[in-house]
Image (cartoon, helix red, strand yellow):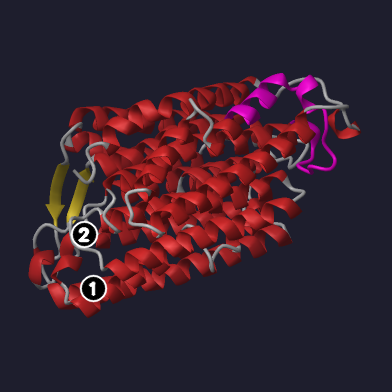
Amino acid sequence: MLTVLVLLLLVPVTGAVLSGILRPAATRAVAVAAALVTALLAGLGVLATYPRALTITLGGLPWLPGESSGGLFGFLLDPLASILLLVVTLIGFLTVLFSTSYLTEKNRDHPVGPQDQARYYFWLLAFLGSMVGVATAPNFLQLFIFWELTTICSWALISFYRSEESLKAGFKAILMTHAGGVFFLLALLVLFAETGSFAFDALGRLGPGLRGWVFFFLMVAAWAKAAQVPFHTWLPDAMAAPTPVSAYLHAASMVKAGVFLMARTVGAGWDVPAPWGLVLGVMALLTMLVALSFYFVQDDLKRLLAYSTIAHLGYVLLGVALGAMGSVVGFRGGVLHILCHGFGKATLFLAVGAVAYVTGTRSISALGGVARSMPLTATAFFVGLLAVTGIPPFACFWSKFMILAGALELPAPLGPAVLILVLGESLVAFGWMFYVGQRVFMGIRTPAAQVNSDPPPAMRAALVLLMLGCLLAPLAGIPLVRLLGG
């Protein structure tokens, strides 16, 4: 099993290096192969360890005092790590596959020449490797190292087009997410100084006062990484990145690192201070409602999806907060939402990318009747929409159901209030997203929609596989989350 886990890290990193030095045609083939092998290794690892948790220690830092002088680095593959690993690797492979056709000179929205391919795939595969490191980290220190690597890769990919807009967006993203990283570092320093350990459960060894402060520092780090209020503004601007990057980093992967941090912290088996669990939940609800308020003024499809992502990351943190307040079902629902939302939102983003590739625009007001010439893309958009908004039997219905059931485990009036707010957000979000989908894909064709067909085969294949994921993701996720918090 050690070999599989080591290869999980080495394969995408090796693919990144090779992509950076090979010719464009070979670069695409190497990138697809590396991403596919990584996804297969992840599936093998998850199946081989289920239902157990596997911890492998490779070494430590002997000059540090306390526990860190022994087993510090290594791998942890448990049900929580498995959830994030499946999201990162499966959607990562489909993103790379989609990119092989999207990132070309035929793209009417953003043509890309062969000279830029190596740079794109290098950073994309480096990011994939970094997220594997985040998912399998056995302690806070190793998680922090890979956390910061994802920040650097994200900056490079957001800035990929090197336009003034993309460079500003990349700088804003790295500034705000790294600010969160500073709070993560503060938490590490206090934790190590007081306990001599970086273990996830080491917070339980702190005194009540310090425990609350360290948890707060980790919350701020998670809020910044997951684009939660008040750090939410970087994510809509990051839509200046290529659409596959938006689908992967800013819907399915990097932003999930923030919520994964809180899930890992809360699920480590120590008693979270009750007031801080309440703060986490209130901020999650506030973020959901703030993000919803921005839906109605967006004309760019990608920016609309960005605000939807912010809201759904709030769903995950709400579920984690319910777990901190004693609801095991709510916690499981929040973790399951990491997987279910990842497939639904990646489907939406890549469907929008396909529309932009063919028509040259993402403007809601400029598009209409697109389904007549792009039926597969339209189907993918509506499947993703139904999945994300929680319509049964699609993926997010199951995770939202568990979150709502968890809310009802809280005492009145808190539980019913949470239920009402979440149901209200879900209803309004569904109505507006369906209205936008109907406007873009149905009705009379606008001049921008006068196109001939769906996108190339690689992009169509990625969309079909993602649509399957919108239905099948809970089948993989529910058995895993049932092992959490029991």
The residue drawn where x is 41% and y is 54% is: 318
Q: What element carries label 2?
A: helix
Measured from the top left, where is residue 357 in percent x and y?
73, 34
Q: Is residue 227 visible?
A: no
Q: Is mark 1 on a helix, strand or loop?
A: helix
256 relative to 198, above or below = above
- Residue 53, picture quadrant: top left
Q: What residue does disc 2 label?
A: 200
Q: Give the mark, 2 or 1, whose residue is nearer the N terminus.
A: 2
The residue drawn where x is 61% and y is 63% is: 233
Please indicate whether residue 4 sits to the left or right of residue 243 in the image.
left
Residue 485 among those drawn in magenta = no
Which tag is nearer the camera, tag 2 or tag 1? Answer: 1
Depth order, front residue of 270/357? 270
295 relative to 400, above or below = below
Q: Is residue 405 visible?
A: yes
Residue 76: mark in rendering: none
Please indicate whether residue 232 sits to the left or right of residue 141 in the image.
right
Measured from the top left, where is residue 370 in percent x and y?
79, 27
Q: Quadrant of the N terminus?
A: top left
Q: Give the range drawn in magenta.
A: 358-383
Residue 211: mark in rendering: 1
Residue contact at pointers 2 and 1, CB within 8 angstroms = no
Residue at the outermost right position: 447
Residue 371 among those drawn in magenta = yes
Which amino acid lies under the numbered mark 2 shown in the image of this protein? Phe
The residue drawn where x is 64% and y is 61% is: 169
